[in-house]
Image (cartoon, rainbow, N blue to C red):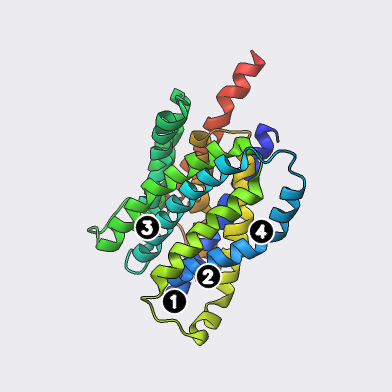
Amino acid sequence: MTRLRADLTLLACAAVWGVAFLCQKRAMIHLGPFLFIALRSWLAFLTLSPLVWRECLDLGSKAKIPAMLSLAGYAGLAFFGAAALQQMGLVTATVTNSGFLTALYVVLTPIFSWLLMRHRPTRWVWIAALLSFVGTWLLGGTSLTPLSQGDLLVALSAILWALHVVIVGLAARFDLSATFTAAQFVVVAVLASFAALSEPIEAQAILRAGPDILYVGVLSSAVTFTLLSVAMRATKPAEASVILSTESLFAALAAFLFMSESLSLVGWAGAAAIFLATLIVQLPEKIERRF
């Protein structure tokens, strides 16, 4: 995969995740956070099962499977922690604060990438990360109400989302995207299923949240996280996190289309800043190639 195709793939993932934010918020009306995470994860695993079978049949050497599964376990733990904190936070956190606080992972990813993968970010990545962070703040209207418990949970989830992006980058070298993604969702599903035993489980509630579960489980989980694993072969976690931060743009667009929300002038300035950040990540490399 070329760098350009990887960037476009990441942009597509961000679009799906932006819409998924609305589905996750809406599902909390009917389900508890852990039950929702468990259902989306089991659905993601089932969706990926045929691809896993095909991938394993084409696998020439099985020597790399234990190492890949080990990373999938760590990815699953990071994903479960991040998803749990985010879902619990969404119960009480405002949309504005949630978008702003979740975007912290854009700034944290280069730090984890530096510490775990020895990928020292260039100054352009730091500039893009900062610009993306400021853009998300502007997109949220430049105002934050006093932080609630839900806000703090969402902020903590950003740490684990950043760690998850870096782990996916480490696993990209195994070239087992579907298997890695499915394995991580098994870990998430098992942990969430045990946690969901403390929540009400009603068939009618699950049916009412069915469309949201399908969207998040199939598109926002199985498809996008597999594509993320593939795209990470051609880009670094720090650059990827900046492009993925455009999910806030797509979330704003989805809110405008489906919830009749609109952006202020300051919000549009934030959208432009995020878009500029995605360009800054890749333009320096193109300039260097030209000269």
In this rendering, position of residue 161 left or right of residue 232? left
Q: Compare marks 3 and 1 and give the one earlier in the sequence.
A: 1
Seen from the viewer's position, the closer of residues 213 and 55 is 55
Looking at the rendered image, the quarter that the C terminus falls into is top right
| SS at mark 4 in the image | helix
- Looking at the image, is mark 1 or mark 4 nearer the viewer? 4
Vertical relation: 3 (above or below) 214: above
**Local crowd size for mark 1, using a 10 Å CA cut-off: few (<14), some (14–19), many (≥20):** many
Q: Mark 1 points at which residue?
A: 31
Q: Are the two marked residues, 4 and 2, in contact with CB atoms closer than 8 angstroms?
A: no
Residue 135 can be seen in this image:
no
Residue at (41% x, 44% y) in the render: 105
Element at label 2? helix
**What number is the disc on residue 48?**
4
Q: Earlier in the sequence, mark 4 or mark 2?
A: 2
Q: How far apart are marks 3 and 1 (CA)?
A: 19 Å
Q: Within 10 Å of the Cα at label 3, are there few (<14), some (14-19), or many (20+) other Cα atoms?
A: many
Label 4 crowd bin: few (<14), some (14–19), many (20+), radius 10 Å:
many
Q: Residue 39 carries which label?
A: 2
The alpha-carbon separation of the residues under discs 2 and 3 comes to 23 Å
Query: Could you say where residue 259 lies in the image, as x and y percent from the top left?
Result: 50, 70
Toward the bottom, the furthest residue is 204
Task: Evaluate if marks 1 and 2 touch, with contact meaning CB atoms under 8 Å apart.
Answer: yes
